[in-house]
Amino acid sequence: MENQYIIKGGTPLKGEVTIGGAKNAALGILAAAIMTDETVTIENLPDVRDINVLLQAIEGIGATVQRINSHTVKINGSTIGNITIDYDSIRKIRASYYLLGALLGKYNKAQVALPGGCDIGSRPIDQHLKGFRALGATVTIEHGMINTFADSLVGNHIFLDVVSVGATINIMLASCMAEGRTVIENAAKEPHIVDVANFLNSMGADIKGAGTDKIRINGVSKLHSSEYSIIPDQIEAGTFMVAAAATHGDVLIKNVIPKHLEAISVKLIEIGATVEEYDDAVRVSADHRLGHTQVKTLPYPGFPTDMQPQIATLLALSEGTSTVTESIFENRFKYVDELARMGASIKVEGNVAIIEGVEGFTGAAISAPDLRAGAALVVAGLVAEGYTTIDSIHFIERGYENFEGKITALGASMEKIPVDDERAVMKFKLKVG
Ligand SMILES: CC(=O)N[C@H]1[C@@H](OP(=O)(O)OP(=O)(O)OC[C@H]2O[C@@H](n3ccc(=O)[nH]c3=O)[C@H](O)[C@@H]2O)O[C@H](CO)[C@@H](O)[C@@H]1O
Ligand SMILES: C=C(OP(=O)(O)O)C(=O)O
């Protein structure tokens, strides 16, 4: 049964929220976990759809997956019986491609369907495949499957033509047990790259330089067991920061690494919000209409593309004209038409959104076009006067755990109800007034 969110807007978010583990780190780490035949324990996993789909795919190839609780899992890769992952088991997620690097690195062969994920533009994987080939693998694509095999993998010097998070992680996976030394130049520097490298090192890999644009990997013969806790999710945290500012609220966002949030904090401060940093928390508040600015998405440490729809939504409510330039993906403005239904004034020209701030939004029936766009529409609904319904929330559930629960705990009125359930809508309206 398909669900939707119903929101009654207009309540400032107030209180504390605890951020979960980083989805995009967890996806790389789960793939890496199958590379040893010993048992690996992973903690602080977010309980979101992408993770559950990847865990099912991992079980599907025969690995043993033991759920200790909703945030901890034990994985044992010694029972893996096949190296083929078909489209049906992973079409909903992008990061299925990490199984390619992990299986190739461990067994010198892998067969994985071309990835799915959010439709935010053309998303080639040529840099991943270039990396595998540089390590000595043969790669072919036939009938929607990527097939790769090697007699043996040998380290190499790889210069990425574009800064790619996925290619950087995939090459680390494929090369950590290759013969000799691999160097990745023009590597991505996102916090999740560092987390995957730290996890692989905790399993006995020898990876240096993660977090810089030159990563050096000395191949080891084997990886061993590990217990590892995933870093907090930078994008979930950023989404709550924006929601706090947009609703003129005051929220303490706990279990974060403030350094990872700097690009977001700086923009919020620039437009007039208050951001206080603590050791592992940030507090965001605003008590007046915020101002305009320019935002351009860039690889880390620049402003993250995964926060672009959320910040654009905030700027659509701020005073004056702002611009948001999307320089990573070419189709990440699909929320603009939905926001227009709520009264936003945004014109997209090429990869730039020109935003004329309006004083407020009004609730409407809207649809989530993808994960982060969906999260941005939730922020819009929290601000809007009246009721907003958002359907296609399966996109949002790819990356936000108990979104409605966390938001409700901050004082707002939001529920997950079945689509087309008029009684549930009436019940919600009666409850919230
Ligand atoms: C599961 C996961 O972690 N997803 C994140 C990851 O996606 P993903 O790893 O797919 O994104 P990349 O960093 O690879 O993409 C960056 C840019 O490089 C291009 N490119 C990428 C690979 C390639 O082989 N060839 C190529 O041309 C892409 O089209 C894009 O323009 O990083 C993105 C950029 O921070 C985030 O928005 C996604 O949330
Ligand atoms: C776009 C995202 O995920 P994916 O790359 O898995 O589609 C995201 O996390 O915002």
Image: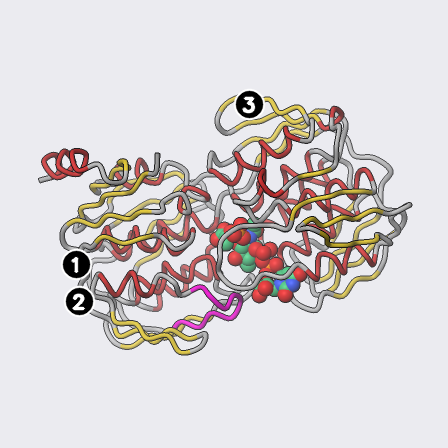
Which residue type carries mark 3?
Answer: Arg
x 71%, y 40%: residue:
200
Which residue type carries mark 1?
Answer: Thr
**Residue 215: image location, x then y, percent:** 74, 56
Asked if residue 274 lies in the magenta stretch, the reply is: no
Disc 1 designates what residue? Answer: 362
Q: For the stretch drawn in magenta, what is the main secondary structure? A: loop
The mark lying in front, picked from 2 and 3, is 3
Disc 3 designates what residue? Answer: 67
Q: Is residue 283 above or below residue 354?
A: above
x 62%, y 56%: residue:
165
**What distance separates the C-alpha of mark 2 from that of mark 3?**
47 Å
Asked if residue 328 lies in the magenta stretch, the reply is: yes
Q: Is residue 6 above or below residue 336?
A: above
Which residue type carries mark 2?
Answer: Glu
Q: Residues within 10 Å of mark 3 (few under 14, many from 20)?
A: some
**Residue 164: image location, x then y, percent:** 63, 60
Specify start and end residues of the magenta stretch as a single range.
324-332
| Foreground pick, 386 / 16 | 386
- Observer able to see residue 178: yes
Disc 2 designates what residue? Answer: 359
State yes or no: discs 3 and 1 in contact (Cβ < 8 Å): no
**Residue 195: image location, x then y, percent:** 62, 45
The mark lying in front, picked from 2 and 1, is 1
